[in-house]
């Protein structure tokens, strides 16, 4: 129990080093930080209202007044890109957190509580067999109106989207966590902790959670990427946010019609989505490589 | 093996029943009223008539059991009588679409080939590209091939299909004029020319989906091969003096492909999801497009049947993957 | 391109030699081969009596036809009937309660059997069956009997006088079905006749050879069509699904299809596609007008129960000068350019069409006149206050302007707000979800009927070509109010004796030109009183391949009403 801590420290330091060596992951991380700064801090510097219509500037290209040009109504693309990014990243992050929460909980329960293991894993299998996008469409169709009435059009759709993506995206996490819990439970230091009478929830919090953190982080990055893509797909199918509410998916979808006339307008939201998802994926990739004990031994051989 | 197969199939049945119940209950909460789509000029009492003629208003469990019976008894009987020419179905009620007033299963049967063609071919293409790319990437981890492969597959993950699809149309249909932008579902393959046309009209939707599939499969193949490359048996094989090619393509591939099969099967729902959007863009008018139009028209029986058909397809794919794993890895059968 | 020119030249030389032959060929049915149509909403059924959707009704219009329909300018034209019955020709009885239709002679169904008055009578029976759930029942309102007098004559009897008796059997929504085919499909059995609903036997230029619901319809020329020289095409593919942009692209940019329906695209996108030179964009206008409605009553919350009722006139919109200034400040041409392009034109009337109904007295609204509006307000005593907002006797010109949530409408709101601020009127914008705004729920404060705002904006039109019931909306007493559960169509709460008198006159006038004069006068009253401020006359935009001839876009009836006349342009 006492010696478990330094080993973990060592491990962490090693993981960080390994992660730094993964160039893609490092670049991805840097880009993600940049994107977050762009959407969160950007509006403080670039203060144009994304909904403001400057009719004379419509369809204008890059200029000082509109660095990324303006759309068909003369709304500033840079401001819209920031606003849209906030929405997309918020959806992605919230959906990811929710699915982690559910998946982690189900995985932990299934791993620790023996009699729950069977039913919970069957439930996971059941969810894995559900056709997700069709279901998502159906649920949005069914509950959109009532949620819109209760929370307003934007918040209603946000809640609905995050809830549904969370509810349908937790299965991988649950499986991974359960597997990891079952492995860790058998490890010596956990057995030792149990033998000195540490309560089960303490074991879960102190020993198991840190160990399953790495696979969770990997599925978190993938989940976030997925959520951003799904949000844009829903916008495409007309079941996403209201039409005047900017998200990256909506911007890209609106610009698709103008692909030939104003290719630049497709470029920015397209790049934003692709690069964000790309960087998140690279981070996940780097995490997987650096957290995997086997690849660890293969590269350093020091542990 | 037969016992194992039967057991797996038997497990699938309650799963499907449960899914059907979930879908039914979910849809039953639908505030969507099929008559809501009618023009405002139609008076309310006429709407009421239309609703009654559509069979709304029965209690829920009655409707569920009725639907089960229609789906699992009447429809198979009808299909049999169509195949054999005998009148087994008789005058039994079938699941009727509210929008088209025709049996839903007929619609599904009509649409299934397009979807399976496009989804199936893109899967085959995805596997054909993904497996070798994954293995070579693993063999030369962090080499230039791995870096390029990783980058391309990441693009496959991260570019929304609705965008890559339209981009392909603009480039290959509008600018170059190589492929048709609208899929002709009435086209019949009768000879080489028509086969060529069929391939041309499938090229773009398949390419869009295959990029996504190949991206996914190559990533998993790479990870799985990496796991295996460090194992003792590979060292042993190498130590025995086997050629690198033989080590990789005989030993590693056989062992690494197992987990990939599972992952590929788990990816099937995602593929059908992607197919919905691809069908919409290229007007393939398969199951996905049917689902979208039915959702827009609040055509509940069709939506219900279709989501269930998707579930059946997914469960079937998982089952197939399980059985394939059983063949690849004999140990699994005894678990 | 060069090859094409050479081939053309070759054709020209050939044509000299074979002229007589090609003239004979020109009269032959099916001579032009194949035509393909794309509707981005896919038809799901071909029986218009079981569907309310435009896509289904228009697809069916290729196959089944009514007794009379509206042509491209909205005039009633006999179709299966020999003439349109009127008071003048004796087809409509003097008491306006019966109308007698006479079929053309020698009409045949596409299966070769003769069309008789019994089929017409059966169609009414089919739709009026209470168990059938007929979507077009409203067309048979007040009908008490439909009888076949002989093989070619059918009499429709109404329970009340109908000065405009062209509901049943007129237009694409009310075609004639074959009794032999649908005889067993009445009432509750209507939805079960899948084969009939997917492939009705008709009298139209084409008949169905294959129907895939929500996907594609294959048709071939009807061998029994009444004009032996038509249709020019032998087969038709009617593809459905996708989105407007893809449909436009398929006709205008890639040339895969010959005709694309209802291209609701931004003006620029359409222009870009049309630049490829493969097709033409065509537009046509019905009666849909986007308008501002002025609240003549006081909507302030302080009025409590009497809010937005005629108990309290509006503090400043009751002044005609203010209403007129609001209208003068608007640049309708710019609104059209931004919102609708070819699918819209500036509107000065609430009854913009058909031609004989459209007034020409209000065309000066086309010019934006900011200075004139300012002078008008000055003259009426509304002077700019310290904050630039005009006021008089402590009343500020501050407007709450509401509409439904919709990208184009929000753009319009933003622009109009800017113009009004130029003339010293302050505006607060509000947009409400369309399902609530138009939902008509008496419990919601945000419906367009309650009108708890000063100005609201939406579009409205009338069905068919007769505006009587549409104009009836603005009669005194038809305003939404608590006593009527907030139902009613008189949104501005307009009340004018002159207007009501004209309306009463119209209800007993059967003569078309006389009805048109009355409609124009009522329109002028509404518009010149500035209780309705028309903005944009919205139309329908479609596209056809350069090589497709004979297209005449029609918004009064099915868009492809004259497909029998379509041909390959040479």
Image (cartoon, coloured by chain):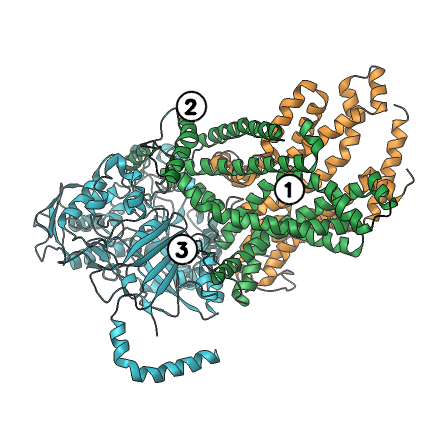
Chain colours: A orange, B green, C cyan
Q: Which mark is residue B61?
A: 2
Q: Which residue is mark 1?
A: B264
Tell me the CA gap for discs 2 and 3: 39 Å
Q: Chain of mark 1?
A: B
Specify the subunit that label 3 lies on.
C
Query: Is residue C319 among what the camera can see?
Result: no
- CA separation, marks 1 and 3? 34 Å
Q: Do the residues under discs 2 and 3 have CB atoms within 8 angstroms?
A: no
Label 3 residue SS? strand
The answer as to whether the residues below labels 2 and 3 share one chain is no
Q: Which mark is residue C239?
A: 3
Question: In this orientation, does residue B45 appear?
Answer: yes
Single out the mark in the foreground, 2 or 1.
1
Q: Mark 1 vs mark 3: same chain?
A: no
Mark 2 crowd level (few <14, some 14–19, many ≥20, 10 Å Cα): few
Q: Nearer the viewer, mark 1 or mark 3?
A: 1
Residue C511 lies, in percent from the top left, at: 14, 56
Q: Position of residue C207 (x, y in %)?
A: 29, 55
């Amino acid at each position: 129990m006492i010696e478990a801590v330094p080993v973990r420290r060592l491990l962490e330091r090693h993981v960080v080093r390994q992660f730094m060596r993964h160039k893609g992951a490092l670049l991805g991380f840097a880009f993600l930080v940049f994107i977050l700064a762009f959407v969160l801090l950007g509006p403080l510097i670039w203060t144009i209202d994304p909904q403001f219509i400057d009719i004379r500037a419509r369809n204008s290209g890059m200029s000082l007044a509109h660095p990324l040009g303006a759309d068909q109504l003369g709304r500033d693309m840079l401001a819209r890109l920031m606003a849209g990014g906030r929405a997309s990243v918020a959806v992605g992050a919230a959906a990811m957190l929710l699915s982690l929460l559910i998946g982690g909980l189900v995985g932990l329960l299934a791993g620790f509580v023996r009699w729950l293991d069977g039913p919970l894993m069957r439930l996971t299998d059941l969810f894995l067999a559900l056709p997700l996008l069709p279901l998502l469409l159906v649920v949005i169709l069914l509950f959109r109106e009532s949620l819109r009435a209760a929370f307003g059009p934007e918040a209603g759709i946000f809640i609905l989207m995050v809830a549904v993506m969370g509810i349908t995206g937790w299965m991988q996490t649950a499986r991974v966590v359960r597997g990891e819990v079952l492995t860790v439970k058998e490890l010596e230091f956990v057995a030792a902790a149990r033998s000195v009478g540490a309560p089960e929830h303490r074991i879960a919090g102190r020993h198991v959670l840190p160990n399953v953190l790495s696979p969770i982080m990997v599925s978190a990055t993938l989940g976030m990427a997925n959520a951003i893509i799904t949000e844009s797909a829903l916008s495409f199918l007309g079941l996403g946010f209201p039409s005047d509410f900017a998200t990256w998916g909506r911007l890209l979808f609106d610009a698709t019609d103008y692909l030939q006339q104003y290719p630049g307008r497709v470029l920015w939201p397209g790049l934003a989505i692709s690069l964000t998802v790309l960087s998140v994926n690279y981070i996940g990739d780097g995490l997987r490589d650096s957290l995997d004990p086997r690849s660890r031994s293969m590269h350093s051989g020091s542990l | 093996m037969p016992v194992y197969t039967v057991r797996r199939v038997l497990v699938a049945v309650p799963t499907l029943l449960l899914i059907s119940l979930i879908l039914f209950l979910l849809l039953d909460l639908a505030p969507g009223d099929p008559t809501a789509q009618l023009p405002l000029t139609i008076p309310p009492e006429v709407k009421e008539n239309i609703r009654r003629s559509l069979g709304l208003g029965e209690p829920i469990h009655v409707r569920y059991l009725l639907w089960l019976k229609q789906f699992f008894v009447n429809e198979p009987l009808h299909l049999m009588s169509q195949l054999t020419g005998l009148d087994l179905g008789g005058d039994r009620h079938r699941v009727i679409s509210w929008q088209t007033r025709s049996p839903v299963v007929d619609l599904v049967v009509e649409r299934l080939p397009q979807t399976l063609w496009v989804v199936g071919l893109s899967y085959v293409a995805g596997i054909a590209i993904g497996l070798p790319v994954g293995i070579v990437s693993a063999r030369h981890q962090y080499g230039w091939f791995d870096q390029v492969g990783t980058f391309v597959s990441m693009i496959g993950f991260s570019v929304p299909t609705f965008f890559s699809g339209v981009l392909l149309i603009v480039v290959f249909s509008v600018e170059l004029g190589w492929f048709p932008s609208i899929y002709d579902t009435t086209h019949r393959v009768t000879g080489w020319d028509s086969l060529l046309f069929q391939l041309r009209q499938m090229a773009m939707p398949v390419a869009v989906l295959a990029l996504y599939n190949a991206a996914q499969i190559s990533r998993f193949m790479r990870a799985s091969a990496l796991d295996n490359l460090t194992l003792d048996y590979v060292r042993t094989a190498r130590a025995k003096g086997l050629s690198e090619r033989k080590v990789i393509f005989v030993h590693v591939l056989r062992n690494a492909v197992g987990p990939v099969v599972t992952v590929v099967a788990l990816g099937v729902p995602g593929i059908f999801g992607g197919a919905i959007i691809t069908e919409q863009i290229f007007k393939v008018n398969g199951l996905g497009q049917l689902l979208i139009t039915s959702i827009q028209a609040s055509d509940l029986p069709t939506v219900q049947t279709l989501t269930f058909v998707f579930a059946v397809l997914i469960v079937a794919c998982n089952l197939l993957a399980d059985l394939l794993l059983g063949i690849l890895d004999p140990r699994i059968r005894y678990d | 391109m060069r090859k094409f020119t050479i081939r053309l030249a070759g054709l020209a030389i050939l044509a000299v030699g074979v002229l007589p032959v090609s003239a004979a060929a020109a009269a032959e049915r099916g001579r032009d081969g194949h035509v393909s149509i794309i509707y981005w909403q896919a038809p799901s059924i071909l029986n218009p009596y079981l569907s309310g959707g435009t896509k289904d009704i228009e697809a069916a219009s290729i196959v089944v036809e009514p007794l009379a329909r509206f042509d491209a300018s909205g005039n009633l034209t006999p179709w299966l009937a020999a003439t349109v019955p009127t008071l003048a020709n004796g087809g409509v009885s003097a008491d306006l309660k019966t109308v007698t239709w006479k079929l053309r002679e020698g009409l045949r169904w596409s299966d070769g059997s003769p069309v008789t008055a019994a089929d017409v009578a059966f169609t009414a029976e089919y739709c009026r069956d209470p168990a059938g759930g007929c979507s077009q029942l409203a067309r048979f309102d007040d009908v008490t009997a439909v009888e076949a007098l002989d093989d070619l004559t059918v009499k429709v009897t109404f329970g009340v006088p109908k000065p405009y008796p062209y509901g049943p059997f007129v237009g694409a929504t009310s075609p004639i079905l074959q009794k032999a085919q649908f005889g067993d499909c009445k009432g509750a059995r209507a939805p079960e006749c899948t084969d009939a609903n997917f492939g009705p036997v008709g009298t139209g230029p084409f008949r169905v050879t294959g129907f895939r619901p929500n996907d594609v319809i294959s048709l071939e020329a009807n061998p029994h069509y009444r004009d032996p020289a038509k249709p020019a095409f032998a087969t038709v593919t009617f593809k459905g699904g996708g989105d407007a942009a893809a449909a436009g692209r398929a006709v205008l940019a890639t040339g895969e299809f010959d005709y694309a329906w209802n291209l609701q695209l931004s003006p620029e996108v359409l222009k870009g596609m049309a630049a490829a030179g493969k097709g033409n964009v065509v537009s046509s206008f019905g009666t849909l007008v986007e308008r501002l409605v002025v609240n003549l009553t006081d909507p302030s919350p302080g009025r409590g129960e009497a809010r937005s009722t005629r108990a309290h006139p509006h503090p400043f919109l009751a002044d005609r000068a203010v209403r007129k200034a609001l209208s003068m400040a608007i640049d309708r041409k710019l609104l059209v350019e931004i919102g609708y392009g070819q699918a819209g034109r500036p509107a000065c009337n609430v009854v913009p069409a058909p031609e004989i109904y459209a007034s020409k007295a209000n065309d000066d609204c086309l010019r934006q006149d900011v200075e004139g509006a300012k002078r008008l307000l000055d003259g009426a005593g509304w002077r700019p206050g310290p904050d630039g907002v005009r006021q008089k006797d402590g009343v500020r010109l501050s407007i709450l302007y509401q509409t439904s949530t919709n990208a184009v409408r929000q753009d319009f709101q933003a622009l109009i707000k800017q113009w009004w601020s130029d003339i010293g009127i302050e505006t607060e914008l509000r947009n409400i979800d369309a399902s609530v705004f138009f939902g008509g729920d008496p419990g919601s404060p945000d419906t367009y009927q309650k009108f708890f705002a000063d100005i609201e904006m939406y579009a409205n039109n009338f069905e068919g070509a007769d505006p009587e019931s549409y104009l009836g909306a603005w009669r005194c007493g038809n305003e939404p109010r608590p006593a009527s559960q907030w139902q009613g169509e008189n949104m501005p709460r307009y009340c004018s004796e002159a207007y009501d008198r004209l309306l009463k006159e119209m209800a007993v006038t059967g003569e078309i030109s006389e009805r048109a004069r009355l409609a124009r006068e009522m329109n002028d009253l509404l518009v010149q009183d500035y209780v309705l401020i028309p903005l944009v006359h919205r139309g329908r935009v479609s596209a056809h391949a350069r090589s497709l001839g004979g297209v005449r876009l029609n918004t009064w009836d099915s868009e492809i009403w004259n497909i029998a006349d379509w041909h390959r342009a040479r």
